[in-house]
Image: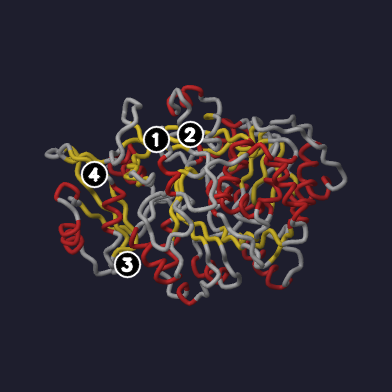
Amino acid sequence: MEKIWLKSYPEGVPAEIDSTQYRSVTHLLEESFRKYADKKAYVCMDKFLTFGEVDQMSQKFGAWLQGKGLQQGARVAIMLPNVLQYPVAMAGVLRAGYTVVNVNPLYTPRELEHQLKDSGAEAIIVLENFAHTVQEVVANTPVKHLIVATMGDLLGTLKGAIVNLVVRKVKKMVPAFSLPGSVSFKQVLAEGGRLTLNPVKLNHDDIAFLQYTGGTTGVSKGAVLLHKNVIANVLQNEAWLHMAPQEEQVVFVCALPLYHIYSLTISAFMGMRLGGLNVLIPNPRDIPGFIKELAKYRVTVFPAVNTLYNALLNNPEFAKLDFSSYKVCNGGGMAVQQAVADKWLKITGTPIIEGYGLSETSPVATANRVDIREFTGTIGLPIPSTEVRILDDDGNEVPLGTAGEIAIRGPQVMAGYWNRPEETAKSMTPDGFFKTGDVGIMDERGYTKIVDRKKDMIIVSGFNVYPNEVEGVVAGHPGVLEVACIGVPDKNSGEAVKLFVVRKDPNLTAEQLMDFCKHELTAYKKPKYIEFRDDLPKTNVGKILRRQLRDEKQGA
C-alpha cells in the first residue's frame, strides 16, 4: 500500500525511526539520568527531584526488589497516583529487570484482584490512601511483597509547616488498613541503599509493561508492551514533536494519571527523553488547585483529554494565566470536541493538536502536525514507521473516503494480550495489523477522522448514527457543560438516540435542546430522549463511560 500520508509530513520529520539505537527502555532512561543529572525532572507540591536523584533512588528501589529474590521478568504492580514515588518505582522496577504492571488506585477490590491474579504480580507498591483495597484481596493473589508509600515520603522539610499541614490533611483521608509484613517506601530506599543494583541484560523482546485496557468493553486485558514497543513510541513522538533545542527547559503538565499509557509515554518518557520537567498533579479534578499549580510554571507541553480541557475552560480563573510559553497542547484519549477546541484556541492562543492511540500501541499511532494553527477535527497522520489501513468487516481495505475499522501496524504495536492467545488472534490481521475497534475515514492526504467505536454505533431505521458526531453538535450549545449519547431500544426504528446532559445553564430545557438539534442534525440523528444529570460516569482519565449508561438503561 502506498503511504499517501508521507506527502503531508512537515519538513524535517522522517518517514522512519531507528529504535535499534537502544537495547532497552532502561538503556534510554539511564542515558537521560547521566545527561541531565543536575536538571529538575519532577515536581509535586513544590518539591523537586532532579534526574540524578531519580537515578539514585530508583537504583535503591530496584536493588531492594532484587534482594527479595524476584526472578528476571517478575511482575511488579504500581498502584500510585501522580506522586514523586511513581517515577522512582517505575524506573526501579525496569532497571531491576522486572515488568511494570500499572494499576489504577481507584480500582474496586474486584478489579484489583482480577489484575493482580491475571498478571501474576509478586510485589506491589501502593499509596496508603488505597491500601485498604489491597488489604481486602491480597490473600487471594500471588503478591508476596507489599510496599506502602505516604504523601509525605519525599516531600522532605521543604516549607515544613505547609507540607506538614497538607500531609496531616491527607492522613485524615486515609481509610484504616492492616497489611502485616508490609514495608514503608522510606524503609525500602534505606535498605536498598545498603545493597547494589545488579545490572540486568535486557533486550528488545523483554516485557517492559503489562498495560491493562480500561475494561470499558468487558474484562480488562493486559497489553504486552515490549521494551522495543516503548522505545519506538518515545522516538516516534520525539521525531514528530520536532522540538528545536531551546534555552528554557521543556515543562510538561502531568495531570493525566501516569498509570495510563497516554501520560506514561507523552509526559514521563518524553519528559525524561528531552530533559524536561514534569509537573505532577495528583488530583486534576481539583480544578482551582490545578490552576494554582499551572500559574507557577512556564508550561511548554500540555497533554489532556477533552473533559479536562473543558473543565479548565469553564473556570474563570484559568483565562487569567500566562499562556505565552505554551507550545504543544495534545488532545487524546477520547474525541476532542470542536466547541472545546475553538474556545481553547481563543483563550490560550494555542491549538489543540489531536492524536490517536491505544494501550495496545504504546499509545501514539497518529497525530496532527504540530505546526497547525487551528483544530482539524481529524486524528492526523500516521507517525513515523507507522501504517494505517481502513478495513471492512471481512478485513479488506476500503476505498479512501469510506468508513471502516482502523487498523495499525508499526514497531509500537503490542506483542499481544497477556495469556490470551485467542483475544490476540482476534485483534490482529495475518499481516500484522492491529484492529482497533474504532471506525474511521481516511482522506486523500492521509488524514483520518474517527467516526466512533464500532460497539458504540447506533442504528436508527437502518441508518448509522455515530455518538461522537451527535455529542460534538450538542456540546456546541452554550447551555451544555457535558454530554453523552447512546442508543436505546425502539419498537419503531430498532434503536433511538438518547442524550445524557450536564447543564451549564440551569434553566436549559429538553425542548430548547431538541429545537437546537433539529437545526443541526438530520432527522434520524436527532435525540428522541434527553435526560439531565448532575454528572456523567467517567474513567479516571476523564473518558465518559457510555457503556455504563447503556448498562443502566438495560438494567432498568
- Report the quarter where the N terminus lies: top left
Q: Contact (CB < 8 A) between labels 2 and 1?
A: yes
Q: Where does label 1 land, which residue?
A: 389
Real-space CA distance between mark 2 and mark 1, rounded to the nearest whole angstrom: 9 Å
- x then y, percent, for residue 129: 61, 53
Judging by the rendered image, the residue that carries numbered circle 4 is 465
Identify the residue under disc 2.
Answer: 409
**Mark closer to the chain start, 2 or 1:** 1
Kind of residue at disc 1: Arg
Which residue in the protein does label 3 denote?
Answer: 504
As drawn, 213 above or below 80: above
| Extreme-left residue of the structure | 492
Q: CA distance from mark 4 to mark 3?
A: 25 Å
Q: Disc 2 marks which amino acid?
A: Arg
3D distance between C-alphas at marks 3 and 2: 42 Å
- Mark 3 near mark 1, Cβ–Cβ under 8 Å? no
**The C terminus appears in which quarter of the rendering?**
top left
Which kind of residue does numbered mark 4 sit on? Val
Do labels 3 and 2 touch, CB within 8 Å? Answer: no
Q: Which circle, 3 or 2, is nearer the viewer?
A: 2
- Secondary structure under badge 2? strand
